[in-house]
Amino acid sequence: MSLLRYYRACRFYEACRCMVFLMAAAIAVCGGGCVAADDAAAAQDGPGDNLPKLLAAAPQLTAEELCHPVRTIREGMLLWCPNPDGRTYDLLQIYFPQYGGPNTIIIIDLGSGELKTVQTERGWNFHLCPSVVAPNGKLFISILDGRLRQKICIYDPASNQLKIDAVPLPDELLGETHPLVLGTDGKLYAIGAHPSKAAAAAQIDPDTLKVTFYGPIGPSHAPSGCWGYSGGADERFIYVASGKVPWYLVAYDRQTGQSHTLVTTENFGGYVSVSQRHDGCVGSASGVKGQGDKRFEYWLYEGKAIPVDNPRTAQPPWPARPAREFPPRPEVNTALAVPDTEGWAEIWVRDAQAGQSVANQQTAQRSWKKFRFQCPLYPQTIYRLRELPDGRIFGTAGAYEGNLIFDPKTGQGKHLGKIGLSHYSTAISGGKIYMSGYPTSPLYVYDPDKPWTAGTVEGEQVIADEQPKANPRRLLLMGLKELAGTHKMYAAATAADGKVFFGGVWIRDGSCGGLAWYDPASGQAAGVWKPFSNYQITHMAAVDGGRTIVISTRAVNDPVLGKPKPDSGALFLFDPEKTAICGQYEPVAKARGTGPIVAVGGTRLVGWTEDPDNEKQSILYAVDVAGPKLLWRKTLPWPLPVAIGSNQQEAWDFRLGPDGKVWTFVAGALVRIDPAEGSVSPVGKLSPGGPLAFAGGKVYLGGTTAVRCIKDFRTE
């Protein structure tokens, strides 16, 4: 059967189903044997045994690759290690296309002027890798493997050699935060988490590489996770800021093996930190249990937290120790350290005194010594697509690698640039694009009619995201506790009055959900999280012309406020004018979450969630939020293709098409759902799927490293 004949047959089949549905509705109105549509039990269809047959008979679609718009590599940390000459340094600039590598380490020997490239295979995570220069002059670097186990690399500046996984650490020493410090005893201390969800640490002798493991340290944070955010060590004790729900300042006695909790914070709003000094350890805490918001400073000595007004000026209680001497660091400019479209990058270095003495810009330029090198580039997966009013398609690349524009008229795609955002959620208001995601739920605004300038170089400096001239520009952090408290914003919607709404989840500080909104007209932002302390926000939709925002949630434990975990996820109805919750509805009892939702016109929406009684099935549903009431419910003979509460990076979508149908992927096929009564009709077999965009009658996809188009198919 040709694709055109198959498509016409599907339309005829749907028309027949629609007639049957209307006849059934008429019988119900006339007093026949049908039940009301808002009776959840009676409104449920059977699993639709004909659907697998329809999908099996569906034609094979071809997704044509049009371009790979984002080929790049991510700039990581710049590490310093003094050379044996006592005057100069080696610089280690780290690059990787995504967490876990493969990693490219550029070694710049400022003593000899030599450049060296070290390439690692995938599996070693150099993101935010703490490093310490040991007394023997070698640089110890803490990284993670694919299972968040801590590993130690050693760089020897005498030979410019880097050894990966050089110290046999125990498997029980985990990340994802993994501070590494030099204790006052001359030993290194790797600090992190234990499988019991308490803290842990390992002592490393930098000369013999002997390891002594300590753990668990302090109380467990279960059911929440544990993050050893910071720590330190003296001759006898290890001090750990163990967080985050609540925070504990813990002292571990290496002689007795006993832990002592010195400070405990409230579940919400507290913070603890530990700093390693050359002569001892200091700590600070806020939100201490029963002490309000006051901040406390401490000497950490002999296993105790000794209050001090200002540890930077007061005399410490321990004996004086001389500080280590290092050569003065030169001035380093990394404005051009992000590789260009060919992989070329530069790091500029000059003597710090020379930079202060230059008289003009031309002389300043000549004072730099430039190190130019080339990095491999990697294509990045396209996670999101969104049509713009002018017909172009706006996209998002993975691994913090920014955004792209694809023009269907020319078939060309362009990598716009990078900002400090891992982009998950998008709202369009007034022709501008509002974006949020991770970390700390930043809100960016982008004007697609103006050039992308954020992160580009102007003179010798990078235009920072928060500068007024930046496009996109970071407006605020919606993850602040007085707003939504969220780390990641997964969902967005635009209200009738132009406000943009974002919803998401807490991470590390708890498992709450949070909602924030921004008014472009006034520049004001607000948010709430307490109503969602046991509901994470996963999806959102604006119905009734944006007069109601529907919030899809997932039921979770609440270690912050202690509210019980709900039996089901729920749809929350939010009035954007009153900025208040105006209703709550559970379309599928006992389902962990209400899943992805899409507005389909008027006050109606279609959602898709798991079947709580059968993990091999899932449930489509339609709700009229004006009631709210259930319009229909349909069981599908496949599980929900994405997990409730997933990281939303799957090659998948669930959105309204130009024909008024809901387009999505299931069982290796692209399908359309009729919002009137839930019939599912295949468009064709297609794998992998991806985010969808519609332009000029064509269907475009992300989900791989290419912008793709379904060949020989039109939506008209």
Image (cartoon, rainbow, N blue to C red):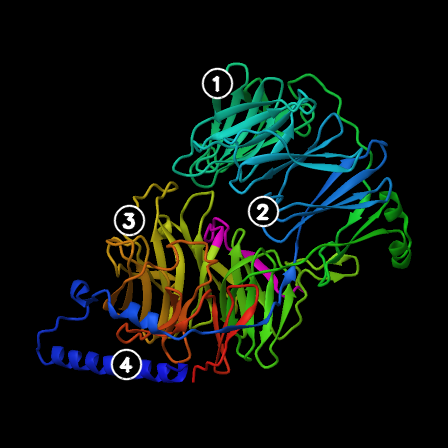
Which label's residue is closer to the chain start, 3 or 4? Answer: 4
Q: How far apart are the two marked residues, 1 and 3, measured between alpha carbons? A: 38 Å
Q: Which mark is residue 258?
A: 1
As shown in the figure, which amino acid type bears the numbered disc 1? Gln
Give the distance between the C-alpha atoms of the residues marked 2 and 4, in whole angstroms: 49 Å
Circle 3 Cα neighbour tier, 10 Å, few/some/many (<14 / 14–19 / ≥20) = some
Q: Does the image show residue 585?
A: yes
Q: Which residue in the structure is indicated by mark 3?
A: 566
Which numbered marker is on residue 13? 4
Nearer to the camera, 467 or 663: 663
Q: Amino acid at mark 4?
A: Tyr
Q: Which residue is mark 2?
A: 100
Checking the image for residue 129, the label placed there is none
Q: Where residue 244 sits: x, y (%)?
A: 47, 38
The region drawn magenta spans 469-488
Q: Any magenta on residue 123?
A: no
Left or right: 642 in relation to 442: left
**Residue appearing at x 69%, y 16% in the figure:** 319
Give x and y (percent) for residue 253: 53, 18
Q: Earlier in the sequence, mark 4 or mark 1?
A: 4
